[in-house]
């Protein structure tokens, strides 16, 4: 049927299970039950009883799949002989799979409010979900502009130690940037790095610059401090300098520039563009004159210099500033 593009419905599945029971064909029965579980189809009670009797002869795992498909019968039918063989971990595993199926069903129905309630319930009980499902929840909430729903799922990941896809983290960061929720951005960056992933120099620099341009240089500084040493390159340092000057903190901007040179980080023309522009906007005429001379010296050497990728990126991002 499936090869012909016809999907069996509930009635068809019940008939097929009955035939499998009569033929004692448990392997085919398991395939049908798996299909029913994936499509939220259930058996009639009489068929369920017949299947349970046949599967009792086949092994506990087979019975567990049958019960996953027909959870609504568990309260009215209980096989005492099997109870000693079902461990707590097995019961928990069944619950996880049920909750995941429920969430997937709600996602298909776009019922994000109901998913919020499921996550809140699981959070209180410390029950986890598959990382792929959590990623889908966050992305669905972001696509609908539901910041609180996305953050609820993110908090769920943090509490239970679930690592999700980097693209999902970035989607959430994009929503938070647009809605100026900068405090949570720092937490997400921390989660990305804690999962062993990296932002990359381009994204790090753009994020730090965006935070600085929103007059929240403290958050820009926190993101910079979270980055591993090898990612604190020319363009990232330059973005932090820009963040300080944009927040009218010229002293910190100058300190960071001098620290950059002391650390042996290459200074690009884009770095000087940021520095001179910031000094001019903050009325620091004395320092402006000194650093203009430094820039001219660098310009004279620049055409013979082999630039790094980070230096070229810095010039692309910041080279157009008025100085």
Image: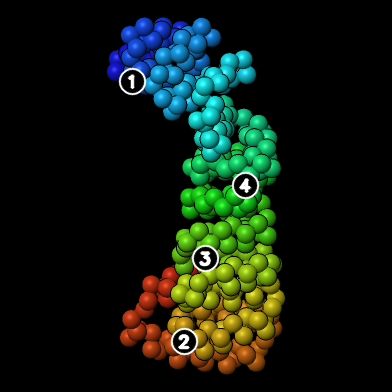
Spot the residue most to the left. Answer: 3
| Badge 2: residue crowd in 10 Å (few <14, some 14–19, many ≥20) | few
Q: Who comes first in sequence, dot 3 or dot 1?
A: 1
- Residue 291 lies, with reference to residue 83, above or below; the image says below
Q: Earlier in the sequence, mark 2 or mark 4?
A: 4
Distance of mark 3 from mark 1, alpha carbons?
A: 53 Å
Cα–Cα gap, marks 4 and 3: 25 Å
Give the Cα distance between marks 2 and 4: 41 Å
Q: In this figure, which residue is indicated by the disc labeled 4? A: 156
Disc 3 + disc 2, Cβ < 8 Å: no
Q: In this picture, is 97 found above or below 263?
A: above
Residue, disc 3 = 204
Up-down relation of residue 59 to residue 240 (above or below): above
Image quadrant in which you'd find residue 297:
bottom left
Determine if residue 209 is in view: no
Of tags 4 and 3, the one toward the viewer is 4
Q: Nearer the viewer, residue 246 or 158?
A: 158
Q: Which mark is residue 304?
A: none
Location of residue 64 in the rendering, given as x and y in whole percent from the top left corner? 48, 26
Read off the residue under disc 1: 27
Which image quadrant for residue 311?
A: bottom left
Q: Which mark is residue 264?
A: 2
Please tell me which residue is depicted at 51% across the width and 24% down the height of the picture. 82
Closer to viewer: mark 2 or mark 1:
1
The answer to whether marks 4 and 3 mark residues whose Cβ atoms lie closer than 8 Å is no
């Amino acid at each position: 049927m499936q090869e012909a593009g016809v999907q069996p419905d509930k009635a068809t599945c019940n008939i097929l299970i009955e035939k499998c029971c009569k033929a004692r064909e448990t392997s085919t029965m398991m395939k049908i039950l798996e299909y029913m579980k994936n499509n939220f189809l259930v058996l009639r009670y009489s068929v369920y009883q017949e299947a349970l009797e046949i599967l009792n002869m086949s092994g506990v795992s087979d019975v567990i799949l049958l019960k996953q498909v027909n959870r609504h019968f568990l309260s009215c039918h209980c096989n005492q002989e099997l109870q000693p063989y079902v461990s707590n971990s097995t019961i928990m595993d069944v619950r996880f799979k049920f909750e995941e199926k429920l969430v997937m069903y709600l996602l298909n129905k776009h019922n994000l409010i109901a998913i919020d309630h499921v996550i809140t319930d699981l959070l209180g009980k410390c029950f986890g979900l598959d990382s792929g499902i959590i990623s889908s929840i966050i992305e669905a909430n972001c696509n609908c502009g539901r910041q609180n729903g996305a953050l609820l799922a993110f908090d769920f990941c943090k509490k239970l130690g679930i690592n999700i896809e980097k693209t999902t983290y970035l989607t959430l960061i994009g929503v938070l940037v647009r809605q100026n929720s900068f405090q949570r951005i720092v937490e997400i960056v921390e989660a990305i790095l804690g999962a062993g992933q990296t932002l990359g120099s381009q994204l790090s620099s753009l994020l730090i610059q965006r935070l600085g341009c929103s007059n929240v240089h403290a958050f820009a500084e926190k993101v910079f401090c979270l980055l591993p040493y090898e990612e604190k390159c020319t363009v990232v340092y330059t973005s932090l300098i820009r963040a300080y000057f944009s927040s009218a903190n010229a002293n910190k901007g100058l300190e960071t520039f001098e620290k950059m040179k002391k650390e042996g980080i290459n200074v690009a023309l884009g770095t000087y563009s940021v520095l001179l522009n910031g000094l001019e906007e903050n009325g620091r005429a004395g320092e402006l004159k000194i650093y203009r001379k430094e820039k001219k010296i660098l310009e004279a050497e620049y055409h013979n210099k082999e630039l790094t990728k980070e230096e070229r990126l810095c010039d692309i991002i910041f080279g157009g500033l008025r100085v």
